[in-house]
Image: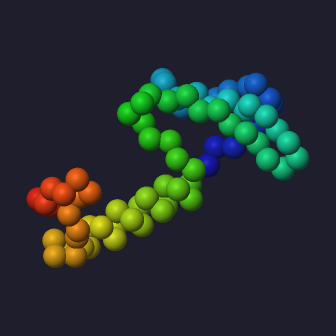
Amino acid sequence: MLVLSRHRDESIIIGDDIIITVVDIRGDKVRLGIQAPPDVPVHRKEVYEAIQRENRQAARLRPDQTRPLENGEPHTP
C-alpha cells in the first residue's frame, strides 16, 4: 500500500485521468474530492461491497425467482 501525506487543497493523480483532492480536514475526518471519467465508477467501500453482494445474490437467482419489470414487460434472460 502506498501511503501519502497531503494537506488541504493538495491532490494525487491516479493514472492519467483520476484526481483526488483533499477538500477539507476536520478532526479525524478528511473530505476528498474525486474527479474521474464518467465510465469509471467511484463508490465508498461499503457501497461497493453492498453492490457486489447484491450482484452475487442476483447471479444465483433462477428465472422463476425473478419478477416482471415495473413497466409490465416480462423478464427475458
| Residue closest to the eye, 12 or 54 | 54
Relative to 37, 57 lies left or right = left
Q: What count of labels does the image hold? A: 0
Residue 19, quarter of picture: top right
Q: Residue at x 15, y 60 (%)?
A: 75
| Residue closest to the eye, 72 or 53 | 72
The location of residue 9, given as percent across then percent down, is: 76, 25
Q: How is the image coloured?
A: rainbow
Q: Residue at x 49, y 24 (%)?
A: 17
Residue at the outermost front position: 72
Relative to 38, 69 lies left or right = left
Residue 51, quarter of picture: bottom left
Relative to 8, 4 lies left or right = left
The location of residue 43, given as percent across then percent down, is: 52, 47
Q: Is residue 4 above or below residue 1?
A: above
Q: Residue at x 42, y 36 (%)?
A: 40
| Residue closest to the eye, 70 or 65 | 70
The location of residue 14, given as percent across then percent down, is: 54, 31
